[in-house]
Image (cartoon, rainbow, N blue to C red):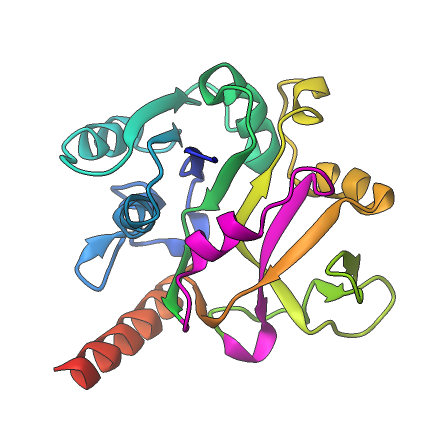
């Protein structure tokens, strides 16, 4: 069973300014609670026992906040105060804290409305370590908010992924949540790099797979997207009332 997650919360949040002038991006509130709590609450519901959270910008404030949580995973801090290492290097630095893996890796600016099946439990159930090195949650581009690109991936017939490559568009975008083995990351240096370096290897080896999101994905990367996400969440709550 996968019981450990890495929550990537160390970014500067430059595009989220002025909301990040005095706080980490992870502490920007959406629908009445910080982004970090949206993700940690999802992990709690999925039964994750340990969450390694990396910190950099406004680290003291973020670290103090997560330590006030009284439910959910045990929080372990991976300190990147001295240097921001991006989404790949941050995991490499945290390897001594993560154990042997595989682990769930989550971006802090990804929130979503569930579909018929809760996302993280269905992702965990889909994981097959015999054939997979990376399993990425993918959102259909037309079911997103705050995303303005042309898509990242296509599905092959067996669930493996293909990059968009020279195509003008692709139907799916990476939705900020994945399961990954740690073996290949353990061979990398502690330096700034993104996970695309790892995906290039697993794509070539045929071990990069996708899991489609059955719901609606919101990329909360700037103040406009934050406001739009709040409006969508309020509308959802109104329907339930």
Counting the numbered discs, the total is 0
Residue 127, magenta (yes or no): yes
Query: From the viewer's perspective, is residue 203 above or below residue 7?
Result: below
Using the image as rendered, state which of residue 168 and residue 175 is in the foreground: 175
Find residue 65 and report its horizontal and vertical position in percent.
19, 34
Residue 158 image-quadrant placement: bottom right
Determine the residue positioned at 50% across, 40% down: 105
Q: Residue furthest top?
A: 96
Residue 163 image-quadrant placement: bottom right
Determine the residue positioned at 19% across, 77% down: 237
Using the image as rendered, state which of residue 228 and residue 128 is in the foreground: 128
Query: From the viewer's perspective, is residue 59 above or below residue 47?
Result: above
Find residue 35 and report its horizontal and vertical position in percent.
30, 51
Find residue 145 and report its horizontal and vertical position in percent.
46, 73
Determine the residue positioned at 74% across, 38% down: 197
Query: From the viewer's perspective, is residue 142 above or below residue 154?
Result: below
**Apparent side of residue 73 relative to residue 238 in the rendered image (left or right):** right
**Apparent side of residue 54 relative to residue 192 in the rendered image (left or right):** left
Query: From the viewer's perspective, is residue 96 above or below residue 17?
Result: above
Magenta span of residues? 115-143
Q: Residue furthest bottom?
A: 239
**Apparent side of residue 26 relative to residue 117 in the rendered image (left or right):** left
Residue 203, magenta (yes or no): no
- For the C terminus, give its image quadrant: bottom left
């Amino acid at each position: 069973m996968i019981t450990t997650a890495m929550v990537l919360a160390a970014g500067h949040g430059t595009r989220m300014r002025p909301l990040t002038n005095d706080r980490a991006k992870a502490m920007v509130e959406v629908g009445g609670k910080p982004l970090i709590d949206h993700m940690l609450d999802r992990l709690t519901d999925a039964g994750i026992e340990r969450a390694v959270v990396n910190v950099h910008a406004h680290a003291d404030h973020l670290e103090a906040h997560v330590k006030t949580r009284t439910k959910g995973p045990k929080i372990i801090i991976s300190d990147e105060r001295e240097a921001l290492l991006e989404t790949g290097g941050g995991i490499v630095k945290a390897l001594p804290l993560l154990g042997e893996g595989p682990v769930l890796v989550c971006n802090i600016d990804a929130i979503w409305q569930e579909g018929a099946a809760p996302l993280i439990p269905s992702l965990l159930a889909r994981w097959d370590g015999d054939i997979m090195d990376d399993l990425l949650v993918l959102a259909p581009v037309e079911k997103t908010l705050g995303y303005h690109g042309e898509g990242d991936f296509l599905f092959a017939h067996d669930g493996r992924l293909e990059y968009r490559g020279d195509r003008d568009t692709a139907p799916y975008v990476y939705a900020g949540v994945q399961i990954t083995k740690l073996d290949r990351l353990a061979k990398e240096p502690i330096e700034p790099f993104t996970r695309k370096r790892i995906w290039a290897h697993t794509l070539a080896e045929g071990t990069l797979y996708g899991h489609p999101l059955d719901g609606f994905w919101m990329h909360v990367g700037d103040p406009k997207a934050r406001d739009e996400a709040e409006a969508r969440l309020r509308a959802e709550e109104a329907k339930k009332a």
